[in-house]
Image (tube, coloured by chain):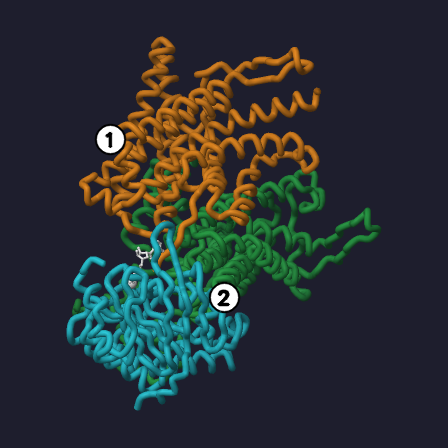
Chain colours: A cyan, B green, C orange
Amino acid sequence: MRAPDTNEIMLQVDGIALAFGGVRALRDVTFNIRRGEIRAIIGPNGAGKTSLLNVVNGFYHPNHGAITFKGRTRARMQPFEAARGGIARTFQNVALFKGMSALDNIMAGRTLKVRRGLLWQMLRYGPALAEEREHRHRVEEIIDFLEIEAIRKVPVGRLPYGLQKRVELGRALAMEPDLLLLDEPMAGMNLEEKEDMSRFIIDVNSHYGTTIALIEHDMAVVMDLSDRVAVLDHGIKIADGTPDEVKKSQAVIEAYLGVAH
Amino acid sequence: MLYREAGQFKTTYAEDMAIFPIRQDRIALAILLGIAFIGVPLLATFHVWPFGSDYLLWAILLPFLILALAAIGTNILVGYCGQISLGSGAFMAIGAYSAYKLATGVHIPFAWLGFAISIPPLPVLASILLGGLMAAGVGILFGIPSLRIKGLYLAVATLAAQFFFDWAFLRIPWFTNYAPSGSVNAPALDFFGLVVRTPVERYLLCLLFVTVMTVLAKNLVRSNLGRQWMAIRDMDIAAELIGIRPLYAKLTAFAVSSFIVGVAGALWAFVYLGSWEPLAFSIDRSLQLLFMVIIGGLGSIMGSFVGAAFILIVPIMLNLVPTELGVPLSTQTITHLEFIIFGSLICYLLIKEPHGFARLISIGKEKLRLWPFPY
Amino acid sequence: MVALGQFLEVLIGGLMSGVLYSLVALGFVLIFKASGVFNYAQGAMVLLAGLAMVRTLDLLVANGFPPWAAIVLGIGFAAVIMAATAWLIERFVIGPLVNQDGLTLFMSTIGVTFVIEGAAEMIFGSDVYPLRLFPTDAWFVLDGLFPGGILINKLDVWGALIAGILVAGLAIFFQRTKTGRALRAVADDHLAAHSVGIPINWIWFVVWLVAGLVALVAATVWGTKLGVQFSITFLALKALPVLIIGGLTSIPGAIAGGLIVGAGEKIAEVYLGPSVGGGIEYWFAYVLALAVLLVRPQGLFGERIIERI
Ligand SMILES: Nc1ncnc2c1ncn2[C@@H]1O[C@H](COP(=O)(O)OP(=O)(O)O)[C@@H](O)[C@H]1O
Ligand SMILES: [Mg+2]
C-alpha cells in the first residue's frame, strides 16, 4: 500500500546555489519532493548530492535560493528546526555515536519526543520512568523491524559496517520523521545486505507513509525503488523525471560516460 | 557462588533497564553498602582493626568519598559530554567559598546607592546545596563559550576559570570575610540540631551525600539527557541533526557537573579540611580529578570511584611499601614517582584502554561469566 | 610627560617579554599544525630543558671547567635531552595514538607533562637554580625626552633578540629546507604527505624536537630572569591562551598573540592591578583568550573551518 499520490509538494528548493571558496557545489538547483514518494538523487562523485541534502536539513547554508518545507519558505534551514519539522537523516560516512550501544543510539533518536525534564529524569520515578519505558517500547519495535535484536547492547563502534548502516536507519526512524533523507544507505554492502536494506526502505515508505529522499549509486536499486529521479552533475541538475525518462536522457548518458561538454 | 546470568531471564524492559541486571551484582552492591553504612561505623566506633586509630577514616575514606564525588562531577562533563575541563578545582572552590559566605551571612553594601543586600547566616545543609547551585551557575557561564568553540579551545576557557578564581579567592578579602591570614574556618556542622563532630559522623555524612548524589547522577546518565550528552561527545553534528540542541545538552552538562563538583568542594572544605586556603583548590586539584576520571574510566560512574581510590592509594603505597622493605623514600621522591606513575598510566590507558579500569573490570566480569569455558 | 614615559616603559617591557610567549607559542603551532596535537606539555618541556642545562652547567663549573665551555656543554646536553624526549614522545605516545581525536591526544600530553615534570625533578633536583647567561641590569634610554629616561631591562632585549633570530630561523627552515617543506605538507594534508612518501613519524619527531629546542631557548631567558624552577611551567603554559588569541594554525598569529598578551598583561597589572589587589598577570592572558573566543572563535588570524559530514 503506497501512500496516496496526492501530488502535494512536501519540500521545494528553489534556485539553490552553494559554494566553498572556489568550488561551486550547487548551481541554481531547483528540486522538489512530493509527500509519500521515494525520490532518488543520482550523479557522479562530487556532483553535489550530499551537499543538497545538507542544505535541506540546514547543515549547509546556501548562498542563494529558498527552501520551502511544509508550506514555510526560508532562505536557510537550521539543523534543529529541520529535525523538529520532521526531517531525519542518515549519512554517507556513518555518523553514529560510536561510544554508545546500538540501543542507546536509537534511543537518542527519541530526544524530540521526550517530555520530562532534567529533574524528573534525575529522579527516574513515576511519570519519568513510565515515559522512559514507553520510548524503550517504541525503540524495541524498530529494533525488531530492522532485525538487530542480537546486537542491541553492542557499542556500535564494534559493529560491522552493514549493521552500522542499519542502526543509523533505526536512529532516524526513532524520530518518526515525515521526510527521511538517506545518503548512500547501501554503499559498500554486498548483494544480500542491499536486498535487506531495499526491503526496509520500501517497508518504511509503505507502512509508515514516510517520504524518502535517497542518494544511491546502484542503478538497479534506484530504478527499482524510486518514483522519481533527479540527476546532478557538477552541481547542476541535468535531468529530472521517472526512472524511465531519466534513463533515456542524453545529458545523463553523457554525464555517466564522461563525455566532455 | 557462581557468577552467572543463566536462568535469569529478563521479561520486561523494567528489569533490563535496572542498573545491575545481574543478581550477583546486586548482592555484591548490597554487601558493599552494608559494610559502608553499618560495618565501618561500628568498627570505627569500637576501634576494632583496621580502625584502631582514625587514620583510615581521616586519611583515606573521607577524602576518597569526597573526591570520588568530585570525580563523578568531572566525569559528567569530560567523560559523558566530551567537554574537557581543567577547572574542576575552581568549581570546588566556588562551592566551598559560596557555602562559607552563605553560612556566615552575606552582606553586600551598595554604598553609592544607599542600600545593602544582607542575607542572614543560613543553615549548613542549605549553604552546601546553594554553594553547589552557585557553582552550577558559574559553570553555565563558563560553558557558554563551548557553544561556539570545539573541545580543545575549551581547555583554555576552563583554565581561565581556574586561574581567575584562584586569584579572586586569594586577593578579594570579601570572600574570606576579611580574614587577615586568608585562611577561613568552616562553621559548626549543625544539621537540624544534629551536630557532626567525630570522624565517624563526618564519614557517615559524606557517605550519605555521595550515595544520594551517585544514584541521581546514575539516573541522569542512563536517561535521555545522558544520551544527549554522549551524543554530543561522540558526534555533535549528527546529534544536532537528530534534534539534540547543543545549547541545552552542553549547558545542562556544565550545570550538573559543576553542581556536583561544587557540593564536593563545600564538603571538602567544611567536613574534611575544617579550615582552608585557596591553595586547596588549585590547578593541581583539577588535574588530579581529571586523572581520576581517565584512570577510572571516562564515561563511567563506577570508574570515578575506582579512579579516586587508585589516585589516593598510590602515594600511600609508595610511602608504606619501601618503608616496610627498609628503604624509605623521601617525600619529594614519592611526589616525583607519583607524577611519573600517573603520567605514564594516563598515556598507557589512553592508548590501550580509553575506558580505564572500569572497562578492565567489566571485561574481567565477562570472562568470569564464561569461566571455565573461555569462549 | 612622566605618565607617557612610564606608559612607554611598561609597554616596551611587556612587548619584550611577549616575544618570549610568541616563541613558545611558535613551538606549539608547529606541533599542532603537523600532528593536530594541542600540547599541554610545553611548560614541562621548558622546565626539563632548563634543569638539564643549569645542572650540567653548575656541575661542570664546580669541576673547574671554564664558564664558556660549561655553557656550551650545558646547552648541548640539554639539546640532546630534548631530542631524546622528542623521540620518546613520538615513539611511545603520539605515534600509537595516531588518528585518535584531539581530546584524547590532548589528555595524553597532560600525561606526558606529569612524566616529564616528575622525571626532570627526580633526576635534576627540584630547587630554584639561578642562571646567569645574560646581563640583567638596565639601560635608561631617551632621558632627553622623559625625565629619568625609560628603563629597559637588558635581559628583555637579549630575549627579544634571540627570539627574533629564532623566529626568522624557523621561517627559513620552513621555506627553504626539504624537511621544512615536508613539514608544511603534513600540516596541510596528512594523507597526501603520506602518499608522496614522506615518513610521517620522522616528521613528528622533528616537530617535537624543534618544539623542544624552542623550549630550551625560552628556558635560557626565563631561567636567567627567575632562576630555573617549577613555576616556569606556568609561564610557558601561557602559550595556550596566546595561541587562542592569535589563531591556532597561524605563525604570524602566534607572534602577534604573544606581543598582545605580553604588553596587555603588563599594562593591566600596572594600571588596574593596584585597585584590585594586584596579581592580574596571573589570569589576564586566559581571560583575554576567553573574550577573544567569544567574539572570534578562530582567533585573530586563524581561518574559519567548515565542517563536513
Ligand atoms: N565542507 C566542505 N568544504 C569544502 N568543499 C566541500 C565541502 N562539502 C562538499 N564540498 C565540495 O562540494 C562538491 C560536492 O560534494 P558532495 O556534495 O559531497 O558531492 P557528492 O555527494 O555528490 O559526491 C565537491 O567538490 C566537494 O569537494
Ligand atoms: Mg556524497
Q: Which chain is disc 2 placed on?
A: B
In the displayed orientation, state which residue is furthest to the right: B114
Residue type beneath disc 1: Lys
Q: Residues within 10 Å of mark 1 (few under 14, many from 20)?
A: few
Q: Nearer the viewer, residue C253 or A124?
A: C253
- Residue A202 visible in the current orientation: yes
Task: State the image coordinates of residue B28 (x, y, percent, origin top left).
Answer: 37, 70
Left or right: where does residue B16 sit relative to residue B75? Answer: left
Q: Which chain is disc 1 placed on?
A: C
Q: Which residue is mark 1?
A: C178
Q: Quadrant of the C terminus of chain B?
A: bottom left
Task: State the image coordinates of residue C212 (x, y, percent, origin top left).
Answer: 35, 31
Task: State the image coordinates of residue A235 (x, y, percent, origin top left).
Answer: 32, 61
Q: Nearer the viewer, residue A219 or C170?
A: A219
Q: Which residue is mark 2?
A: B211
Residue type beneath disc 2: Thr
Residue at the location (47% across, 56% down)? B74
Task: State the image coordinates of residue B130 (x, y, percent, origin top left).
Answer: 63, 60
Would you place residue B84 above or below residue A131 in this image?
above
Q: Quadrant of the N terminus of chain B?
A: bottom left
Left or right: where does residue C221 sit relative to residue A222? Answer: right
Q: Quadrant of ligand 2?
A: bottom left
In the displayed orientation, state which residue is furthest to the bottom: A1
Report the disc number at residue B121: none
